[in-house]
Image: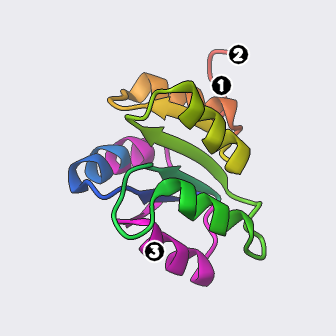
Amino acid sequence: MTFCLIVDDSATIRKIARKSLEEFGLVCEEAEDGVYAYEFCQKKMPGMILLDWNMPRMNGLEFIEKLRGMENGDAPKVLFCTTESSMDHIMSAMKAGANEYIMKPFDQIILRTKLVQLDILEDVEA
């Protein structure tokens, strides 16, 4: 069972994402910004991180750069989930260590597809 950390400053997005991820069988915890997420990862490294870009104190890009520098920080699959849609943002996220990228708003089908691509869920249609 994959342990997922949802990192987003929006309580609504965290709630929606958590509901979907838990329906997929993942165990979830939440962090409201990159600082809380980083502190969380120092205590327990998740298998997957659903990460927003625009957050106070430490944004998603800053967080992933710090995460990838941590011991075992290369282990989590990081799925950026953001409103930032420019190719520059996508390339910056991937260069910093993101494994995949989805746009808000997302639905359960898009989220499931990305989790299959990340080998977190099995493709039941295969």
- Marks 2/1: CA–CA distance: 6 Å
Q: Which mark is residue 123?
A: 1
Q: Is residue 114 above or below residue 20?
A: above
- Marks 1/3: CA–CA distance: 34 Å
**Magenta span covers which residues?**
18-46
For the residue labelled by badge 3, is the local secondary structure a helix, a strand or a loop? helix
Compared across the picture, whether 56 is left or right of 70 comes to left
Which numbered disc flags the more N-terminal residue, 1 or 3?
A: 3
Cβ–Cβ under 8 Å for marks 2 and 3: no
Q: Which mark is residue 35?
A: 3
For the residue labelled by badge 1, is the local secondary structure a helix, a strand or a loop? loop
Cβ–Cβ under 8 Å for marks 2 and 1: yes
The reply to whether residue 85 is visible in this rendering is yes
Location of residue 15 in the rendering, given as x and y in whole percent from the top left corner? 27, 51
* Foreground disc of the pair 2, 3: 3
Mark 2 belongs to which amino acid? Ala
Q: Nearer the viewer, residue 42 or 113?
A: 42
Location of residue 46 in the rendering, given as x and y in whole percent from the top left corner? 61, 65
Q: Residue at point 54% right, 36% down?
A: 89
* Foreground disc of the pair 1, 3: 3
- Image quadrant containing the C terminus: top right
Mark 3 belongs to which amino acid? Val
For the residue labelled by badge 2, is the local secondary structure a helix, a strand or a loop? loop
- Marks 2/3: CA–CA distance: 39 Å
Dot 3 alpha-carbon crowd within 10 angstroms: few under 14, some 14 to 19, many 20 or more:
some
Q: Is residue 35 magenta?
A: yes
Q: Residue furthest top?
A: 125
The reply to whether residue 120 is visible in this rendering is no
Which residue is denoted by mark 2 in the rendering?
A: 126
